[in-house]
């Protein structure tokens, strides 16, 4: 959308399939007969299968409020969406832009617009929660993100509910809040989540779960000859074991790999999701995995947390950038269950992957005090300031000896 990459560069070329002896059919599946193991396409083609994989993804969720179908209101999910947004901005030259929702998609777009043309737009973000990135961060970690965005000229209206989208002549003119206040808008972005695309799966009469197609740890559906993966399935959380609405590109890719392994004869159960994710908002990087402190409380898990300020390099090296880490531990046995990072360094934010691996390894605070990370003055903090180990030390100091 920012014009930094071409559309062709982010999709797989047809040759990738043909070079691997894969018959690529670009068509819409009209129906699937599970008894005869045959599907029909809208173009009239009949295809028989031994095993079928359903990966229909998800669709943007649009709030059921007046004006949600006006011209000038956009969601961002596909390449076509991005191209439509660029075309609208080029033709209509909007000045006032309102974002409904403070999730990472909206905030990424908002900061891209501010970066690309600092004086061209008046950007306002309206969020129902009292903080941005509510799925990723606890309120204490979200506060510096809010301050940063406001410092970039983005107006953050937190704790506000959007009641309707205002329009004239079929075109967006503003946003009305539940308080009665109105905001002028030439363009509105609404990215408040997505819903799985289950139309085909329901027509096939596959068993459904709370958040999508019900699958086992091998991604087999209620029909042993039909697999499913990605945003259209009901995932389970690695820590709680409960169904979760997590929908991310990374897990979808891994689930595709898992299905391929199963088709090849492997029996490797999927462990569940942690929601490991990262985003760049201008010069600020944010990442999270596992449960936030608030998530844990909602699941009746008592926690002990530690927050540590660190830096991207040794203090003596020029170009040091600060970053902050928060770790969430279960109080009972000090098992690590969550982590959050807010950083001014793109490299430091990837330490969330280390946290993710430690959670899946079921490590405790006692294990973490001996975590030995590679150190170099140019690319890491001093070994004595490694934030994961310091956070573990703080937790052990609070809970005492066991």
Image: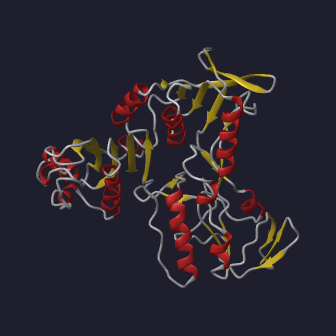
The residue nearer to you, when weighing 18 against 137, is 18
The residue nearer to you, when weighing 387 against 246, is 387
Q: Position of residue 175 (x, y in %)?
A: 65, 22
Compared to residue 212, the image places residue 137 above or below, namely above
Can I make out residue 171 in this image? yes
Residue 141: quadrant of the picture: top left
Quarter of the rendering occupied by the N terminus = top right
Its colouring scheme is secondary structure
Q: Where is residue 159 in the image (x, y as percent from the top left)?
A: 49, 25
Q: Position of residue 307 (x, y in %)?
A: 25, 41
Q: Residue at x 59, y 59 (%)?
A: 9
Residue 37: quadrant of the picture: bottom right
Q: Is residue 76 left or right of residue 348?
A: right
Compared to residue 363, the image places residue 127 above or below, namely above
Q: Residue at x 22, y 44 (%)?
A: 311
Tally of marks: 0
Q: Which residue is drawn at 76% across and 26% down?
A: 171
Q: In this view, does 187 lie to the left or right of 249?
A: right
Can I make out residue 290 in this image? no
Quarter of the rendering occupied by the C terminus = bottom left
Q: Which residue is drawn at 43% across and 44% down?
A: 280
Compared to residue 359, the image places residue 297 above or below, namely above
The residue nearer to you, when weighing 114 against 268, is 114
| Identity of the residue furthest to the right in this view | 44
Q: Position of residue 192 (x, y in %)?
A: 58, 39
| Identity of the residue furthest to the bottom in this view | 265
């Amino acid at each position: 959308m920012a014009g930094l990459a071409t559309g062709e560069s982010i999709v797989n070329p047809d040759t990738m399939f043909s070079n691997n002896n894969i018959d690529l059919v670009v068509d819409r599946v009209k129906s699937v007969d599970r008894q005869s193991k045959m599907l029909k396409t809208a173009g009239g083609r009949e295809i028989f299968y031994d095993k079928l994989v359903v990966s229909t993804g998800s669709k943007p969720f649009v709030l059921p409020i007046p004006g949600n179908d006006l011209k000038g209101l956009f969601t961002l999910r596909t390449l076509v969406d991005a191209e439509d947004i660029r075309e609208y901005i080029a033709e209509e030259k909007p000045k006032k832009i309102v974002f409904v929702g403070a999730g990472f998609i909206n905030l990424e777009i908002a900061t891209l617009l501010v970066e690309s043309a600092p004086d061209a737009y008046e950007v306002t973000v309206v969020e129902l929660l009292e903080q941005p990135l509510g799925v990723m961060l606890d309120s204490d970690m979200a506060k510096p993100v809010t301050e940063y965005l406001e410092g970039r000229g983005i107006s953050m209206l937190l704790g506000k509910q959007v009641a309707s989208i205002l329009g004239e002549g079929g075109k967006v003119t503003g946003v009305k809040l539940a308080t009665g206040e109105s905001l002028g808008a030439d363009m509105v972005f609404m990215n408040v989540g997505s819903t799985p695309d289950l139309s085909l799966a329901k027509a096939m009469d596959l068993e459904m779960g709370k958040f999508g197609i019900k699958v086992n740890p091998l991604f087999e559906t209620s029909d042993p000859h039909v697999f499913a993966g990605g945003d259209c399935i009901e995932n389970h959380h690695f820590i709680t074991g409960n169904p979760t609405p997590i929908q991310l590109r990374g897990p979808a890719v891994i689930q595709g790999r898992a299905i391929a392994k199963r088709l090849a004869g492997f029996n490797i159960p999927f462990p569940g999701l942690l929601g490991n994710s990262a985003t760049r908002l201008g010069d600020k990087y944010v990442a999270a995995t596992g449960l936030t402190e608030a998530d844990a409380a909602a699941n009746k898990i008592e926690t002990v947390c530690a927050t540590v300020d660190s830096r991207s390099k040794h203090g003596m090296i020029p170009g040091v950038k600060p970053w902050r880490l928060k770790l969430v531990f279960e109080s009972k046995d000090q098992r690590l269950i969550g982590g959050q990072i807010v950083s001014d360094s793109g490299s430091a934010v990837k330490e969330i992957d280390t946290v993710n691996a430690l959670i899946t390894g079921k490590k405790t605070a006692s294990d973490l005090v001996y975590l030995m990370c590679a150190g170099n003055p140019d690319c890491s903090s001093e070994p004595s300031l490694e934030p994961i180990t310091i956070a573990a030390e703080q937790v052990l100091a609070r809970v005492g000896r066991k």
